[in-house]
Image: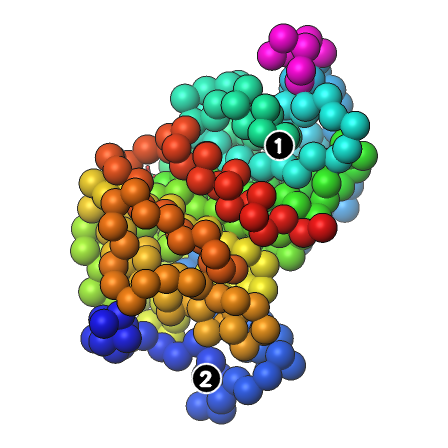
Amino acid sequence: MLVKELQSRNLPDLLTFLNGDKVLDKEDWALRRKEIQNLLTQEEYGEFYEPPFNLAYKTLDTDDNYCAGKVTLSKILLTVELRGGTYSFPIYSAIPKSKNPCPAFLHINFFEPIPNKYMPVEEICDNGFSLFSFCYKDVTSDEDDFSDGLAGIMYQGSKRTPTSPGKISIWAWAAMRVMDYLQTLDSIDKKNVAVVGHSRLGKTALVTGAVDDRFAFTISNNSGCSGAAISRDKQGEDIRVIATIRPYWFCPNYQKYIDREHSMPLDQHFLLAAIAPRNVYVASALEDIWADPNSEYLSCVAASPAYVLLGEIGFVYPDRYPEVGEKMHDGSIGYHLRAGTHYFSRYDWQMFIDYINKHKNI
Ligand code: GCU
């Protein structure tokens, strides 16, 4: 049934190069992945700024007695030095007092201090995970303005070109800097770090995982249009809406695809596949019709062949759309459909914890 659904969407083939050649093995895939990453950055999100030439971390505040003494909560100022100048933003960490290094969630967050409504810190730490979080607006504003924060330093007042970074690429770049910081910590199990985000920040998490191989898990919650969901014939939000209301999330080239989804040389399953062979997780909510759960699910199905080509399990799913409350946790691509509306709930966190525990790198 889903094969038919996919055929009707007329997706560009993941395993065919732009020149028409077929992708036959792992070596071909390495080249095809580059091609896909280029399509994603040049046609949709914008190119990534070069890595900083220096990073510094300063602990501003520590509570060693957090959660009845089980957890150390810290606020850290992260400073990045770029060609155009220096920029600092705060990050928060919550690290369980454990003898062994803990797997970690890096949450690209809507809010600054933790815990907050999208981040049940004690519960996550009790499950043996450490947490890192930063507020996306502390990096650069969520506005069509490239003069403030990190964007101001990257752009240096220059005009945007067709492929220059949108805000999603800049937030993703910042998440990579938090990952740089994690690499310096003995308390973290670096083989098992997940980047996670909700909604626009779920889109950002996927872009981060697609370009940074250090993340073993990439998790998008209700990311919808220009996130996990297939764009061709998507319900709810489409490229016309998102590229008109939030043009600055993307590179200017993305405007070309307003009302022309079917002419795109890519679709969102390319974004999931660029993460292969590392695990990716897509979470949907039944009433989040703006994001379109069915199109999010189809994307998992369509990305699966890249995993299979690489010798991974791929997506394990029944040949139908998911039912509410159902989770698909057996394969390299994880999925669940939660009841309710657009939200990042405790249930979603529980699903992510369950999935990571199942697929953790030893
Ligand atoms: C809007 C937007 C979505 C986005 C969401 C959010 O609804 O249309 O694409 O995911 O905001 O980030 O909350």
Residue name at image x 62 percent, y 75 percent: 30
Coloration of the structure image: rainbow
- What's the amino acid at mark 1? Phe
Q: Nearer the viewer, residue 330 or 131?
A: 330
Residue 202: name its quadrant.
top left
Residue 156 vertical position relative to residue 62 in the rendered view, above or below: below
Q: Position of residue 69 (x, y in %)?
A: 68, 10
80 sits left or right of 237 in the view: right
Residue 122 vertical position relative to residue 240 in the rendered view, above or below: above
Q: Is mark 1 within 8 Å of ligand 1?
A: no
Q: Nearer the viewer, residue 208 or 142?
A: 208
Q: Position of residue 122 (x, y in %)?
A: 55, 19
Residue name at image x 44 percent, y 90 percent: 20
Residue name at image x 76 percent, y 46 percent: 53
Secondary structure under tag 2 reads loop
Number of disc labels: 2
Residue name at image x 63 percent, y 8 percent: 68
42 sits left or right of 66 in the view: left
Reading the image, the residue beneath label 2 is 16
Reading the image, the residue beneath label 1 is 129
Q: Which residues are magenta?
A: 63-71
Q: Nearer the viewer, residue 77 or 151?
A: 77
Task: Find the distance from the CA under tag 2 to the CA under tag 1.
Answer: 39 Å
Q: Nearer the viewer, mark 2 or mark 1?
A: 1
Q: Position of residue 12 (x, y in %)?
A: 36, 77
Q: Is mark 2 within 8 Å of ligand 1?
A: no
Tell whether position 67 is magenta. Answer: yes
Q: Residues within 10 Å of mark 1 (few under 14, many from 20)?
A: many
Q: Nearer the viewer, residue 52 or 345?
A: 345
Residue 26 vertical position relative to residue 99 in the rendered view, above or below: below
